[in-house]
């Protein structure tokens, strides 16, 4: 696993879950759930040991990468959307945190401001967006 970039909130959530699971693992000593808890503890420890936490301060970026907060504008209706591209462990579309594997992130990674990205939706249409802002750590 390569070096992961996690938000401060994502790092905090994983650390909190790890503490909770370690505290409760004695309760599950003779339970069938023990295997799950032990593997989840190991998974979180691996994630945290191979990750860096982004600083809270963001600056204008030259190109989209994991950790970027991008603002895109739909080319037909001119609606704007802002997303932060994160590792799948942190993805939460309700908070506009999208996985680097999502269609929008996949299309945007490596692009610059004023670049157009095209996303094909299941109905077969193509949605086109213009990247109007990039903020990186």
Image (cartoon, grey):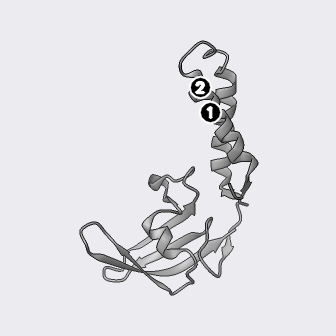
- The reply to whether dot 2 and dot 1 touch (C-beta < 8 Å) is yes
Mark 1 closeness class: few <14, some 14–19, many ≥20 residues within 10 Å:
few
Q: Is residue 101 above or below residue 51?
A: below
Residue appearing at x 63%, y 15% in the figure: 29
Across and down, in percent, residue 54 comes to 71, 60
Considering only vertical position in the picture, is 60 above or below 21? below
Quadrant location of the C terminus? Answer: bottom right
Tell me the tag on residue 62: none
Kindly give the residue lying farthest to the bottom in the view shown: 114
Quarter-wise, where is residue 129 in the image?
bottom left
Q: Quadrant of residue 85?
A: bottom right
Q: Nearer the viewer, residue 78 or 102?
A: 102
Q: Residue at position x 52%, y 53% from top? A: 91
Query: Which image quadrant is residue 46 in?
Result: top right
**Disc 1 secondary structure class:** helix
Q: State the residue at coordinates (55%, 74%).
A: 109
> Residue 28's x, y, as percent?
60, 17
Tag 2 residue: 35
Give coordinates of residue 95: x percent, y percent: 49, 54
Q: Please state the total of marks drawn on the protein image.
A: 2
Instruction: Give the SS element for disc 2.
Output: helix
On the picture, is 131 further left or further right than 26?
A: left
The residue tagged 1 is 39
Furthest toward the top, the residue is 30
**Cα–Cα span, label 2 and label 1:** 6 Å
Indicate whether 136 appears above or below 18: below
Q: Is residue 116 above or below residue 3?
A: below
Q: Residue at x 50, y 86 (%)?
A: 115
């Amino acid at each position: 696993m390569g070096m992961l970039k996690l938000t401060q909130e994502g790092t905090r959530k994983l650390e909190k879950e790890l503490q909770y699971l370690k505290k409760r693992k004695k309760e599950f000593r003779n339970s069938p759930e023990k295997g799950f808890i032990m593997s989840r503890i190991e998974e979180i420890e691996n994630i945290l040991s191979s990750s860096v936490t982004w600083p809270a301060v963001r600056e204008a970026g030259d190109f989209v990468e994991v950790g970027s907060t991008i603002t895109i504008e739909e080319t037909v209706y001119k609606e704007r959307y802002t997303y932060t591209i994160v590792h799948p462990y942190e993805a939460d579309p309700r908070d506009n945190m999208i996985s680097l594997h999502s269609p929008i992130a996949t299309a945007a990674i490596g692009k610059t401001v004023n670049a157009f990205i095209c996303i094909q939706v299941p109905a077969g249409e193509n949605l086109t967006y213009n990247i109007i802002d990039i903020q990186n750590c």
